[in-house]
Image (cartoon, rainbow, N blue to C red):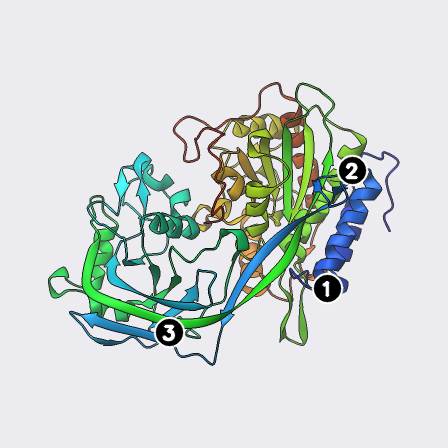
Amino acid sequence: MLGQAPDSLAITTRELAARLRFFSSDLFEGRYPGTRGEALTTGYLVSELQSFGLRPGAASTANGTAGWLQPVQLLVQRPDSGSPVEARLTGRISGQLAPGKEVTFANTGRSPNVSTAGELVFVGYGIDAPMYRWNDFAGINLRGKIAIMIFGEPTVEGDTLRFNGVRASRFSWLTDKVAEMDRRGAVGVLLIRPDGSFQSPFRVSRYLASDVRDDGIRFFGGLTDSALARLLPPKSGSLEKLLKAADRPGFRSLPLGVNLAVRFRTEPTLVTSHNVIGTVPGTDSSLASQHVVLSAHWDAYGIGKPVKGDSIYNGALDDGSGVTAMLALARVFAAHPQRRSLTFLFTTAEEWGLLGAHAFVCAGPVPMERVAANLNLDDGLELLGPKRDAAPLGVELSTLGQTIQQVAVKSGLRVSPDPYPAEGYFLRADNYPFARAGVPALYMALGTDAVGSSRQYVDAKVKEYLERDYHQPSDEYETVALNLEGSRQYAEFVRGVTTTVANEERAPSWLPGGEFERPRKQVATTRCAR
């Protein structure tokens, strides 16, 4: 299928184009976890890694041989449409919240039956961040309560340091905020949403099966702003006033004096999916036990609702582009091993909440104290053509930033800051579970200073993709693969960073005072994705 250049270690646009066109074709049926599309996808990835000469990187199978696949057990809770939903108010206000109109629920437990109650408490953004001297929970006991929170994090006017200014901090990540409230004993969490946001009383929820229990938070959901406004105590003022107060230091959580009793039922399904893992052993006996993990997610959205007659959600940019770059890198490094071992991790269920990456971090074949760094390939801007700059996310957090600067100079590139800081892409990709566990990590990306065009062109194309193609059937090779010279440049840049990290005497480390600074041995081993 692939025509190689005379230099077998060269990465060519021809190679990248052939693989991306094939991997994002309808043959793979949208690469949905737990389906025939997954079997086709993982089979293809394994066959490629075998042909390159990598070693299987997953744990040993039952017969004692090393495997390519790490099983990932997923729990999916879907609505039981025949079951009634109860959202009953008592206390200072009595009555019902209208399911599907004012409130919606998702089951966060293992049991299909959810029945719980507690006082409603407005907790602002639901953040406890000592490094920023911010605690929305000061003076409040959440045990047995239902927390109501705002999405994201505070915007403190004129403050460019607290919560990173315009760049989203780790404290804005919804999963971690829910985990914080779970640790504090809450039985439910409701996110404030605009009127008209809900399509149904229920939401489908997906988790790592090993993560789920029934003695913590029992539901997550949404509450409309108008419903919250009518539940506020008279002396608290307007909802607008309360939301503004939550943006200021010193905010204190507000008990509403209203209890909410919630009862509904879901239909649980267990799905077995797989990460694909291959390894190139290191050549230096003193460093080979350490791994540099390169990651990209193979999953997309499968076969779904037809759009303009097309029902296959191919995921060419997201993340076929990262997978095909990583396959090229696996081929190159299999023929040219480095001092540290290189692990190529193709994750499942990224689109379900980074669950495959969480499974690798928490129960994978390589303990996190032996992972020197993670480089995640899930950007896609490279498909728009070559750039004059590189813009990996997370460079300000660890010594990997210095490595990026060195490699960029050698590659003739400038290093630019995150071009879309408010989007929080660092928190929304598979590098985040590694960073959360204490491993220095980067979201690898080129910048937006395009050769032969302009930043405005790139920004317009990004906007077009997000509005038209993102998680849609139109995310296809013919739509998004505009100039694969950028993909070649991207792969070579990642190659340079990987080579440097894999051969330096000292492993990367977090910078003092950063958001993710922690001892490497403090890796979560329970409820890992929450």
**Mark drawn on residue 36:** 1
Kind of residue sitting beneath label 1: Arg
Sequence-earlier tag: 2 or 3: 2
Q: Residue at x 81, y 43 (%)?
A: 50
Q: Residue furthest front?
A: 63
- Count neighbours of disc 1 (C-alpha within 10 A) and say few if under 14, some if 14 to 19, many if 20 or more: some
**How many numbered circles does the render carry?**
3
Would you name the residue on which mark 2 appears? Answer: 54
Q: Is residue 510 left or right of residue 258?
A: right
Which one is earlier in the sequence, the residue at label 1 or at label 2?
A: 1
The residues bearing labels 2 and 3 have C-alpha atoms spaced at a distance of 51 Å
Provide residue 435's location: percent of width, then percent of height: 50, 38
Along the horizontal axis of the image, is 479 left or right of 106?
right
Q: Secondary structure at mark 2?
A: loop
Q: Are marks 1 and 2 in contact (CB under 8 Å)?
A: no
Of the residues shown, which amino acid type is indicated by label 3? Gly
Label 1 vs 3, first from the N-terminus = 1
Spatial CA distance of label 1 from label 2 is 25 Å
Provide the secondary structure element on which disc 3 rests. loop
Q: In the picture, residue 138 is in which quadrant?
A: top left
Q: Nearer the viewer, residue 177 or 393?
A: 177
Provide the residue designation for mark 3. 196
* Coordinates of residue 3 in the picture (x, y in percent): 87, 46
Are discs 1 and 3 less than 8 Å apart at CB?
Answer: no
Q: Residue 299: in sight, yes or no?
A: no
Percent x, y for residue 431?
Answer: 55, 42
Say which quarter of the image contains residue 295: top right
Please state which amino acid type lies under the numbered disc 2: Leu
Q: Is residue 43 left or right of residue 1?
A: left
